[in-house]
Image (cartoon, rainbow, N blue to C red):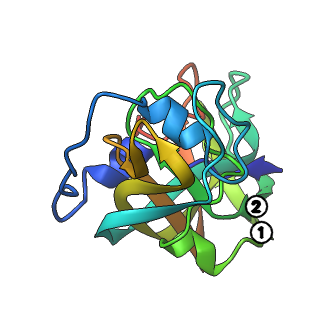
Amino acid sequence: MLVVSFVLFALLGHAVSAPAFIPRDDSPSDTDLLLSCPGAPGSPNVERADKCTLVNIVNNPDTPVVSNVGNVQANCEGGTDPIMLTVGGSTTISSTTTANADVGVDLDGFSIGGGLSTASTSSTTQSNSTMITIPPGRQSVMTVSVLSHSQSGNVQVNYGDRVDDHFIWFTGAVITQVTPTNQLTFDVHETACGTDPLDLNNHS
């Protein structure tokens, strides 16, 4: 089983427009702000935040995110005949939250409201298999394309007490929340022997 990983930079490349940044003072840092959010480990520099909310939201176009699943099957032993094999695999789809900057924190498990990812926190597993013919000198692996919604924005962080003279702070870093749909397309990715079979950009 392979968990589908969503690449933020690819999604941001399809964004209609970049979120409008809210000016703020130099402190606290984005790292401290995000670490203080509910569900985060906490920061030694600021107190725990009451809540964190995605603001300045930009709705990105729905994007198919492609990943490889299952084991690679190959016909690379120097034979001259095609072979028939069954390829298959499974994938787990769930919501993700990612930062577009190196803020030094893993956002997994953070509670950031206001975005699509709050609509569902469940994960589902889908699997598929099919019989294929692999020509000599070729190798194949099953892929899955997951149509995903995403929203990008800054994070508004609310504190119960003043932090550096303010109750509310905003991150400069852009956060993207991705919610996969149940629209999955399984396919077979075939490449030449001797190349990386898991490189989905390789169309040799």
Mark linked to residue 92? 2
Q: Earlier in the sequence, mark 2 or mark 1?
A: 2
Which amino acid is tagged 1? Ser
Q: Residue at x 66, y 24 (%)?
A: 44
Q: Which quadrant of the view contains residue 180?
A: bottom right
Could one spot residue 183 in this view of the protein? no
According to the picture, the residue beneath numbered tag 1 turns out to be 123
| Left or right of residue 85, residue 32 in this image | left
For residue 131, above or below residue 35: below
Q: Residue at x 19, y 55 (%)?
A: 18
- Exactly how many numbered labels are in the figure? 2
Which amino acid is tagged 2? Thr
Callout 2 touching callout 1 (CB < 8 Å): yes
Q: Secondary structure at mark 1?
A: loop
| Left or right of residue 140, residue 157 in this image | left
Could one spot residue 32 in this view of the protein? yes
For residue 69, above or below residue 184: above
